[in-house]
Image: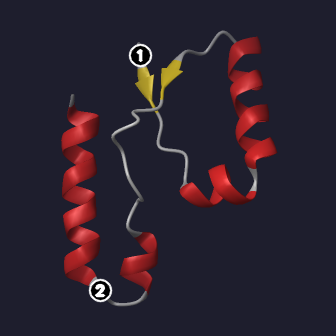
Amino acid sequence: MPSALQISCITKHYYPETHDNFKKLCSILNFTFTEPIEATCCGLPYFDRGELKAAKNIAEYNLQVYGQ
């Protein structure tokens, strides 16, 4: 079964070695996945600041991306 992952922007930008190691581990385990390039921020920073409308818009957009 194909899987799509949303790796957080914090992981990608602040801990790139964790992201790289995760991809290596998946390769070793023969686990295939895609990372949709159209996906954006998960919206958590906006949610944490109380900007619920912005967080909801981001979430709805990502649901459309991952729904493909």
Residue 37: assigned label: none
Q: Is residue 55 left or right of residue 37?
A: left
* Dot 2 or dot 1, earlier in sequence: 1
Q: In percent of the image, x 41 and y 36: which residue is there?
A: 37
Q: Position of residue 53 (x, y in %)?
A: 19, 79
Name the residue located 28 percent from the left edge and 49 percent from the top edge.
62
Q: Where does the image place residue 31, in percent across and percent down from the top left?
A: 60, 15
Disc 2 element = loop
Left or right placement of residue 50 versus residue 65 in this view: right
Horizontal relation, residue 42 to residue 22: left or right:
left
Mark 2 = which residue?
51
The residue singled out by tag 1 in the image is 2
> Of 40 and 6, which appears nearest the observer?
40
Q: What's the residue type where badge 2 is placed?
A: Glu
Dividing the picture into quadrants, the one containing residue 7 is top right
Distance from disc 2 to disc 1, alpha carbons, whole Å, reads 33 Å
- Crowding around mark 2 (Cα neighbors within 10 Å: few <14, some 14 to 19, many 20+) is few
- Residue 35 lies, in percent from the top left, at 47, 32
Location of the C terminus (image quadrant): top left
- At numbered mark 1, what does the secondary structure look like: helix, strand or loop? loop
Task: Residue type at mark 1: give it.
Answer: Pro
The residue depicted at 41 percent of the width and 16 percent of the height is 2
Q: Quadrant of the N terminus?
A: top left
Q: Is residue 21 above or below residue 63?
A: above
Seen in the picture, residue 10 relative to 49 is either above or below; the reply is above
Give how far across and how far down residue 10 sits, in percent. Answer: 62, 61
Q: Alpha-carbon neighbours of circle 1 within 10 Å: few (<14), some, or many (≥20)?
A: few
